[in-house]
Amino acid sequence: MALTFDSPLPPAPRRPAFHDRLRGWGWVVLVTAVLAGCATPPPPQAEAPAPPVTVAPPPPPAPALEPPFTGKVSLAANERDYRRDGAQHLYGHYGDRVFRGKLPPLIQAVGVMRLDIGPRGELRRFEWMRAPDHVPHVKAEIERLVRAAAPFPAPQRLGSVSYTDTWLWDKSGTFQLDTLTEGQLDRMPPPPARATKPATSPAASRPAAAAKSRQAPTTAARKAPAGSTATRVAQGEDAAAQPVQLPR
């Protein structure tokens, strides 16, 4: 026996709205994929050029080692102390040209020079602070002496040094440096006194001939004969007495 239902079927349950939205997004994704497949593919990007190959330059040659310093060394801690070492160095080079004793009141030239000395005693430069331009030959001679005296004592503690000294030049061609000067005379010494001749009396200053004429004849004198008178007639310095016969 079959069962029959006269009442209508109940409606199907409605899907939630989330599924509807998901289905809508699916269509959007599908359409986008189709359009993307139909679009022209972008051109391939050009490959970047390879960087140029650079070759490193060869390293510079190692600097040559300086030979060990064998010259004089100064342990001066300041410019004043080194100035004395520099003056003694010049005196040692030119001992025969150093003026001995005090300088005369008037000297030929005064020059003030500044020297620049390197770490190994080399003379880097010099300049005149007060040049003896009125005597060009003296100026040139001082410059020659300074150049020829290099190298100077190496300023070991100072590294390098600049110092100033004064040249005191005599007309004899000798000099002193102000650092080691022995001073200067206030005035010239008096000239040595001349030897005076002893005073002579007027009688002692008479000619010797007059004294000889008063001497008596000796060798050449002869006795006059009896009854006659002898008279000396001088014919010269050595003249002899000759007898003369006088009338009676």
Image: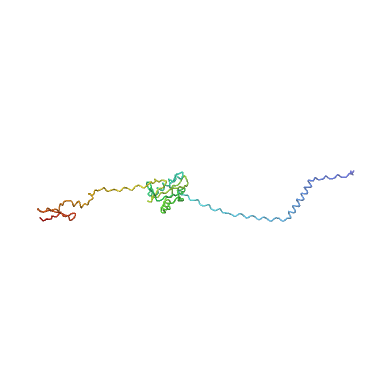
Q: How many numbered marks have been drawn onto this rendered protein structure?
A: 0
Q: Dividing the image into 4 quarters, which one contains the C terminus?
A: bottom left
Q: Nearer the viewer, residue 172 or 187?
A: 187
Give the x, y percent position of residue 81: 44, 44
Q: Nearer the viewer, residue 28 or 102?
A: 102
Q: Dividing the image into 4 quarters, which one contains the N terminus?
A: top right
Give the x, y percent position of residue 3: 89, 43
Residue 182: quadrant of the picture = top left
126 relative position to 20: left or right: left
204 relative position to 110: left or right: left
Q: How is the image coloured?
A: rainbow
Q: Nearer the viewer, residue 153 or 235?
A: 235
Q: Nearer the viewer, residue 140 or 68?
A: 140
Give the x, y percent position of residue 148: 42, 51
Give the x, y percent position of residue 207: 22, 52
